[in-house]
Amino acid sequence: PLTHAIAVSLGGTLYVIGGRGAAEGSQTAAIVAVDPVTGSTRAAGRLPVALSDAAAAVVGDHVLLLGGLTPKGTTAQELELTARAASP
């Protein structure tokens, strides 16, 4: 199971970003889009680094990710994602 993922709503779609499994250092870089009406999911991209436990904010059509954990430990990295980058 996936835990410690980041979830944001953008343009009527829920995005599940990163997260980790039960094992230490098992972060993922996956971005999954979830249609809240149908419940269907699809791959929507990948982060440049595997990440869990980050803070997130939606600003316009951007998602800002701040901090979190990578497989190597805590990071202060800031990432900016756009809806265009996450679209099919």
Image: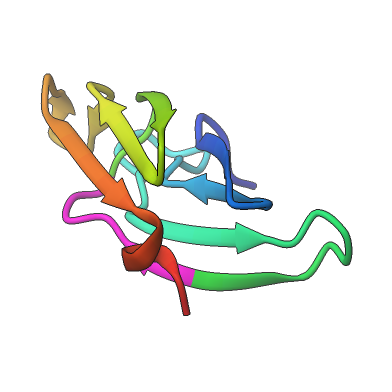
Residue at (30%, 32%) from the top-left corner?
64
The magenta stretch spans which residues? 44-50
Residue farthest front in this picture: 60
**Which of 55 and 23 lies nearest the eye of the viewer?**
55
Residue farthest bottom in this picture: 88
Residue at (29%, 49%) from the top-left corner?
81
**Which of 8 and 30 lies nearest the eye of the viewer?**
8
Q: Where's residue 38, x and y in %?
A: 88, 66
Q: Is residue 78 magenta?
A: no
- Residue 52, by quadrant, is top left
Relative to 41, does residue 82 appear above or below in the rendering? above
Question: How is the model colour-coded?
Answer: rainbow
- Residue 23, by quadrant, is top left
Q: Is residue 46 magenta?
A: yes
**Which of 86 and 25 lies nearest the eye of the viewer?**
86
Residue at (35%, 25%) from the top-left corner?
54
Q: Where's residue 2, x and y in %?
A: 58, 44
Q: Where's residue 48, x and y in %?
A: 17, 56
Relative to 57, does residue 31 appear above or below in the rendering? below
Task: Report the label total.
Answer: 0
- Image side of residue 16 versus residue 12, left or right: left
Q: Where's residue 62, x and y in %?
A: 34, 43
Residue farthest right in this picture: 38
